[in-house]
Amino acid sequence: MRAFGMWLTSIVLLLLASIPVWSQDKEEGRPPKENKPKEHKSPLDRLARTELTPVEQQELPVEAVAVIPGGGAASIRSCAFLPDGSRLAIGRQDGAIELWEVNGAKPKLQATLENSGAVAKLVFSPDGKHLASLHGVPSQQMRLWLMEEDGARAILSHKLPRIEDVAFHPGAKKLALGSLAGQVYDIGDKKLEGSSWKFGGAINNYQFTPDGKRFLAVFFQQERNGPLYGSEVMFWKVSENELVEYQKIQTGSTFKAVALSPDSNQLATGSVDNKVRVWDLTVKEPQAKELFEMPRWIRSLYFTKDGSHLVAFSSGTDITLWNLKVDKAEKNWEFKPRRGGPFGTGPMHQSFSATALAPDGRHIVFSNHTPSAVILRLPITRAKEK
């Protein structure tokens, strides 16, 4: 009888050890309470954790409020929120693009847009009227979709030998497209028309400032940067007929992620040295201020809507919510999915494959090379400035 009791105890301990862990900040001491919004100021505020399955509630942190289910679908490669936050676009490895309504208690699939080639990137235009998708590994095709009430309709396709990134101009029917040698195109009814706005050396992280007067990208030119691939961020002034180089920042480490603050006065960068830095763009020669270091190199960065916080995703499954007002981490997570569970399938489930920050600045979505995606509500609180 005693031997049976010892055997039963060992079984219980094994079961407990198999439960997945979301590591919380050590200083907290206990898991936080669910962060419930007091009123629906954003469509995503209606998402309810109570709609998660018991397994999902067990495997995800308390901040998780929704899951985009995968079922038998292909793994997720990209994602993007519609500017009003009401819909989420999901791009899969098999080329499918799904549009999900996220303005209710739980996500609802609205439409599936069929295409060929893995969906490497999804970007909405600032007015929400268009969706651009990059396809293939490496990408060689860009498709442009016109958003409609019940889905989206493909209106044109453009091919290049290689496409690293795409970005919409905020004030005109234009988009930047390319790799190393790229240009800004005018969006026509059936095709893209090349403009005189051209740029060389821009390899990824394409962005226009909100006023459309500047363009920036991670930059590389062999004769100038040598072996330091992607070690500069270049800024171009947008004139009537051309883009003019006027400012750059540089480090001794490759930039992997950049984010422009809402007022365009700061630039956050993440590098392969695992460090997140912020640069003051109001001075002639910006200098870096190191904020924090993550366990792995930085995959993506986002300023919140009010510019008070920075959200960083590592190339693994680490997330940091950094409070810029008090210059400290407000929250750290590390996702450790249970192998074989709903978020632990495939050989690459220990790294993020897609991330995005919602327009409201209070929700994030991510996927870790699995068919599912998770939406978290950020536990942002007002902090006193120094």
Image: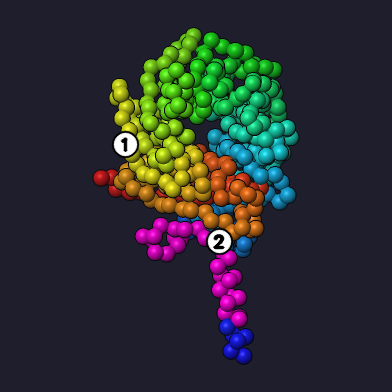
Up-down relation of residue 318 to residue 216 (above or below): below
The residue at 62%/13% (across/down) is: 193
Residue 43 rendering spot, x and y as whole percentages: 55, 44
Q: Which residues are magenta?
A: 7-33
Q: Which residue is mark 2?
A: 20
Amino acid beneath label 1: Lys
Residue that appears at 60% across and 47% down: 348
Q: Which one is in front, 374 or 52?
A: 374
Quadrant assignment for the C terminus: top left
In the visual, does 384 lie left or right of 262?
A: left
Label 2 packing within 10 angstroms: few (<14), some (14-19), many (20+): some
Q: Quadrant of residue 124?
A: top right
Question: Label 1, on which residue?
Answer: 289
Above or below residue 142? Residue 81 is below
The amino acid beneath tag 2 is Pro
Left or right: where does residue 276 sit relative to residue 158? left
Dot 1 or dot 2: first in sequence order is 2
Where disc 2 sits, the SS reads loop
Whether residue 21 is in magenta: the answer is yes
Numbered label attached to residue 54: none
Query: Label 2 near label 1: C-beta < 8 Å?
Result: no
Query: As drawn, is 381 to the left or to the right of 386?
Result: right
The Cα atoms of the two marked residues, 1 and 2, are separated by 36 Å
User: Residue visible at 51% across and 25% down?
Assistant: 203
The spot of residue 198 in percent (x, y) is 52, 14
**Figure check: 315 above or below 251:** below
